[in-house]
Image (cartoon, rainbow, N blue to C red):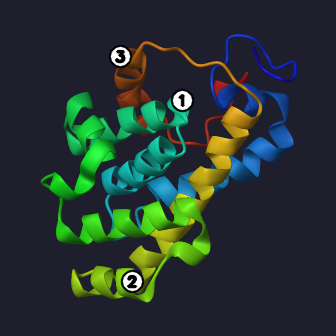
Amino acid sequence: MPHIKLPEGLPGIRGPMAFSPETAKPLNELAEILLRDDNNSLSRGDRELIGTYVSALNDCFFCQNAHGGIAQHYLQCDINFIDQVKADFRSMPLSDKLKALLEIAGSVQKGGKYVTTEQVDAAKANGATDKEIHDTVLIAAAFCMFNRYVDGLATEAPRDRQIYVDRGPRRAAEGYLNFDLYK
């Protein structure tokens, strides 16, 4: 049960967003830029996967499944692939660049000072640009905030993971600026 009275029938982050539309707008604008902006050399799928991974590290059920469903859509993979990435991305068939960026994202999840020069150098050696490293750090930091927002208010979320898989294509198409979702 949520810690505060949130609108009913709006799981996860949707409830707090509807509760506070004035904060929902800039938060969603940030998500739109970080995850969907096409002026980015990281694919939308890769960016959603970074958010999914950080959400898994934070044990945020709603966010890891909601964004995992979107990542599945973009990456054309299944829930098992996403689960394996969350469990051990290093052994998965991902680019060395994405693995290096996930390493950085995992360090950001612990705290910004956990990111090392060696991790950044490894990412660059595997082809990551300064912009990709910047965006990885910002995505990871933003997801820590989003995860804490969702779980700090004890929001409710459907436990049937297939719901998130089924919603992934629709969420990918609509983006994060559709404020009707929060009504």
Find residue 91 and report its horizontal and vertical position in percent: 16, 54
Amino acid found under the numbered disc labelled 3: Gln
Find residue 40 and report its horizontal and vertical position in percent: 39, 69
Residue 78 can be seen, yes or no: no
The residue that appears at 74% across and 34% down in the rendered structure is 17
Find residue 143 and report its horizontal and vertical position in percent: 57, 51
The label nearer to you, 2 versus 3, is: 2
Of the numbered discs in the image, which one, if any, rests on residue 62? Answer: 1
Looking at the rendered structure, the secondary structure element under dot 3 is helix
Q: Residues within 10 Å of mark 1 (few under 14, many from 20)?
A: many
Which residue lies under the disc numbered 2? 120
Query: Label 3 near label 2: C-beta < 8 Å?
Result: no
C-alpha span from label 2 to label 3: 36 Å
Specify which label sits upstream in the sequence, 3 or 1. Answer: 1
Which residue lies under the disc numbered 3? 162
Q: Residues within 10 Å of mark 2 (few under 14, many from 20)?
A: some
The residue that appears at 52% across and 36% down in the rendered structure is 63
Image quadrant where one finds the N terminus: top right
